[in-house]
Amino acid sequence: MSRNTKQVPKEEIIKQLETCDIVRQLLAKKPKERKALVDTYGCQQNEADSEQICGMLSQMGYGFTDNVEEADLVLLNTCAIREHAEQRVFGNVGALVHSKRRNKDKIICVCGCMPQQEYVTEKIKRSYPHVDLVFGTHKLWQFPSLLLSVLQNKKRVFAIEDEGGRVAEGLPVLRKFSYKASVPIVNGCNNFCTYCIVPYVRGRERSREIEDIVREVKDLVNGGCREITLLGQNVNSYGKDLEKAKDFSDLLIALAQLDGDFLIRFMTSHPKDASDKLFAVMEQYPNKIAPQLHLPVQSGSTRVLTAMNRGYTREKYLELIRQVRARIPDITLTSDIIVGFPGETQEEFEETLSLIELVEFEALFTFVFSARKGTPAEHFEDPMPIVQKKENFQRLLDVQNEISERKHAEYIGKTLRCLVDQIDEKGNVIARTPGGRRVHLEKDCGKLGEFVDVSITNASKWSLFGVIQK
Ligand code: SF4
């Protein structure tokens, strides 16, 4: 397939921008400013999508509010990764019926990964008649014309067709923060891990052109952005679908060579596609590429990894860890683990425990397996009782907590260049180490988005504590 078939033509984007103006003129006839509430669920990719949605809403003349009653438009950008999250969305969509009864003109939209599943759209059609607009991940760039259709025709609109997933450049973005930003580099996934719904709801991998990403990052850096997180379900397969032979390492080099004081992070890496070439680039640009690697292993058993269709073995994973530590000894390593994958035996769980003891991650994101409708693992035999799974889960947590506490203690006495990341209304300040760990600073110190040298004075299993060096 030629590269051009994957990009939304410029004229189509211009049409959407013109539609923004038409909606703006329509809204200008209303007596007061229209306000939107955008509620985002799930991962950072969804957060990034919401920033585009807000960009389009702003261009259409909407202001923003957190108050449902005050909102003229409520949009739920949903996540399909876990059933629990879906139930929560359905609950929230249901609750909006009261608000809609009080204001018949209120527009309710549901978008994101959930509607990409047929049963969800059918359920909304049948059981939630107060929802006006439903669109899937492939239709996001058409939001202005979909909304205009709802406003003009006063009819419900459902747009969830999979277009083979194209890349849309040039849409407006309204960023939540000025000092940090997420930049999607590849959307969708080709891996079909047997437990995961992502390939079904976000389609096949589509990489953005390297020039478009470099331009966006350059603009961000010139605008004062200090931390840029490159996003993709599998960043390591970036560029495989591009005509020009560019891979993730080439992209990192191009970004690291930009002028300015900023740090690049990325997520998520897939062990199947991670390589020593990537680690060499990270080693080469220590001031621009964060010494941080989130490398989801999921299980320490090769048999379970094969059943998950992960495409690597326990040995290959451990070799990657050896390679990256050889190049960047103080790299911050984190990972994901699924406990109780269907068919996992007690011995196989013990292999996972032994792997985390061998690697010593600084933190783990751990889950007890729960089947997602529409994935192959939904039909796998699952003989291990849930009580046993929960017991294993607790053992895993206990072992990891002890490792995290020990790893964090190693920071005490070090001085690190950290980015001031959060200051709450009580004056509590949190900074991030280059490896992405949270550091609690003294109250009312530092400025949001500035790099400061921090001496680490204390540590717990969750966090670090420090003071800014004057
Ligand atoms: S790599 Fe696997 S787990 Fe990750 S998004 Fe793709 S299918 Fe899902």
Image (cartoon, helix red, strand yellow):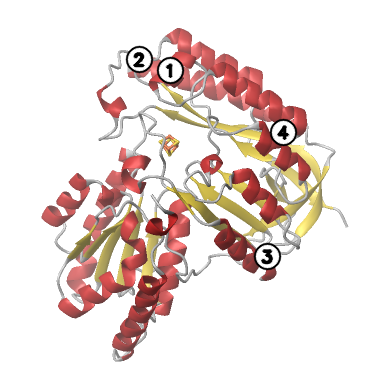
State which mark lies toward you, 3 or 2.
3
Disc 2 to disc 4, how far (Cα)? 34 Å
Q: Which amino acid does label 2 sit on?
A: Gly
Q: Which amino acid does label 3 sit on?
A: Val
Question: Judging from the image, what secondary structure is the residue with disc 1 in?
Answer: helix
The residue lying toward the viewer, choosing from 211 and 127, is: 211
- Counting residues from the N terminus, which is met first, the one under dot 4 or under dot 3? 3
Image quarter where the C terminus lies is bottom right
- Counting residues from the N terminus, which is met first, the one under dot 4 or under dot 1? 1
Q: Are marks 2 and 4 in contact (CB under 8 Å)?
A: no
How far from the left and from the top, in percent, is residue 338?
A: 45, 26
**Is residue 261 visible from the viewing direction of this image?**
yes
Depicted 114 relative to depicted 151: above or below: above
Disc 3 to disc 2, how far (Cα)? 48 Å
Q: Which amino acid does label 1 sit on?
A: Val
Q: Are marks 3 and 1 in contact (CB under 8 Å)?
A: no
Does 401 sit left or right of 157 as displayed?
right
Q: Quick check: is the Cβ at mark 2 less than 8 Å away from ligand 1?
A: no
- Counting residues from the N terminus, which is met first, the one under dot 2 or under dot 4? 2
Residue 343 disc label: 2
Q: Are marks 3 and 2 in contact (CB under 8 Å)?
A: no
